[in-house]
Image (cartoon, rainbow, N blue to C red):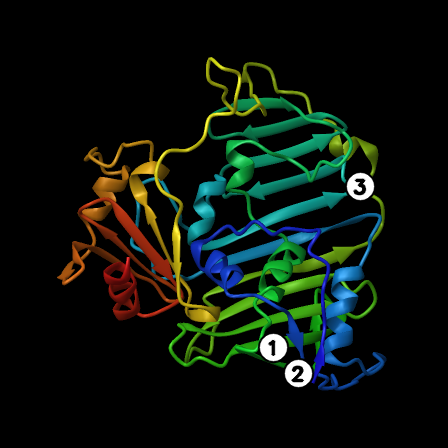
Amino acid sequence: MARLSLPSSRRARWAVPVVAAVALAGVGPLATTLTASAQGSLPPRTAAQLLVDVQRARVQALSGTVVETSALGLPAVPGVGGRGGASFSSLVSGSHTMRLWYAGPDQVRLALLGQLGESDLVRTGSDVWAWSSDTNTATHWTAPVAGSSGPTGPDAAAAPVTPQQAADAALKAIDPSTRVTTDPTAVVAGRSAYELVLTPRDSRSTVGSVRIAVDGTTHIPTRVQVFARGATAPAFEVGFTSFSTSTPPASTFAFTPPPGATVKQGSLTAPHDVTGSRAQPSGATPSVVGTGWTTVVVADVGSMTGGQTNQSSPGSLAGLLKSLPAVSGAWGSGHLLHGALFSAVLTDDGRVAVGAVPPSMLYAALAHG
């Protein structure tokens, strides 16, 4: 085996909780020197070489169609999820199609295409726009040009990840608890690609494997699939169905709110108190129990919801909890969310435990804390 230290300059933002659990699994990257099968015109590459290729990949421009599919086994929440939704919050379930255009860090556009509408995140220079056709609302932010990573704001935080971002987070999970292998060359968006397979060595993890397709020419990840243990179809998948490195026209990144739209001005500045210091979130720092793929995070849910846990409206956290199975034990009582790739317990005393593990490991973590 060959130890490999990868740069950590790029940070991933995951659209679903399970991918966050995968990101938490990684410390001390380790890659095997297994050789990828060279089929077609692709030269052979070891797994370690492919990981470095991904981290060093640079592309000046790209555009394409991205399809994201989530089958996480989550309960239905009114107004959230479903096939063909045009809101970024709908990405937690169903299948969704997006268009992505990129011509540098200050020229980015992402469009989520719904059956009857569209949501867009657009960045041109220092101007950042979020647009929803459902509400006919456009929100504008002004961001620094240098060193920015793209659209930000409330909707951007819930925006879908690109295959590149998804792969970056999955690669953090490569440590001694992970077996890294390569499959024969795949074809994604009509292009030859290598495929890396990350498999947890710990059989207690609900994640069976993470498969990352790496474009053979650009070394950009073009598809990421996450499989539940024992499953033959991915529970989460995001990948290109069309892919081009041609520079999009400048008009692609021009945005003007349509007539009659409600226009809001967002703020990228964190709240300040009267002393001028940045406001800090309330609640204790989340605790981490376990390591690798079976890591469990325990946190105070009240601090994450602004103390709104007592609301009982259908769309509130408390309303959602009432629809989940009640559970109890030496750790206390609460409600269980058991998905295909992860589990979560929200306790009656205001704690949440989440991880890519079976419920029994969440109960043990709650008792531990």
Q: Which amino acid does the dot numbered 2 rest on? A: Asp
Q: For mark 1, give the secondary structure.
A: strand
Q: Which residue is mark 1?
A: 197
Q: Which amino acid does the dot numbered 3 rest on? A: Gly
Q: Which residue is mark 3?
A: 104
Q: Is residue 317 left or right of residue 25?
A: left
Q: Does the residue at mark 1 contact the one at mark 2 (Cβ under 8 Å)?
A: yes
Placement of 166 over or under 274, stated as above or below: below
Find residue 177 and report its horizontal and vertical position in percent: 52, 77
Placement of 203 over or under 82, stated as above or below: below
Q: Nearer the viewer, residue 306 or 165?
A: 306
Q: Earlier in the sequence, mark 1 or mark 2?
A: 2
Quarter containing the C terminus = bottom left
Placement of 22 over or under 111, stated as above or below: below
Q: Quadrant of residue 316?
A: top left
Mark 3 crowd level (few <14, some 14–19, many ≥20, 10 Å Cα): some
Mark 1 crowd level (few <14, some 14–19, many ≥20, 10 Å Cα): some
Q: Which residue is mark 2?
A: 183
Q: For mark 3, give the secondary structure.
A: loop
Find residue 202 and report its horizontal and vertical position in percent: 44, 79
Q: Earlier in the sequence, mark 3 or mark 2?
A: 3
Find residue 17 and report its horizontal and vertical position in percent: 43, 54
Question: Distance from label 1 to label 2 (Cα)?
Answer: 7 Å
Q: Nearer the viewer, residue 174 or 153?
A: 174
Quarter containing the N terminus = bottom right
Q: Nearer the viewer, residue 152 or 1?
A: 1
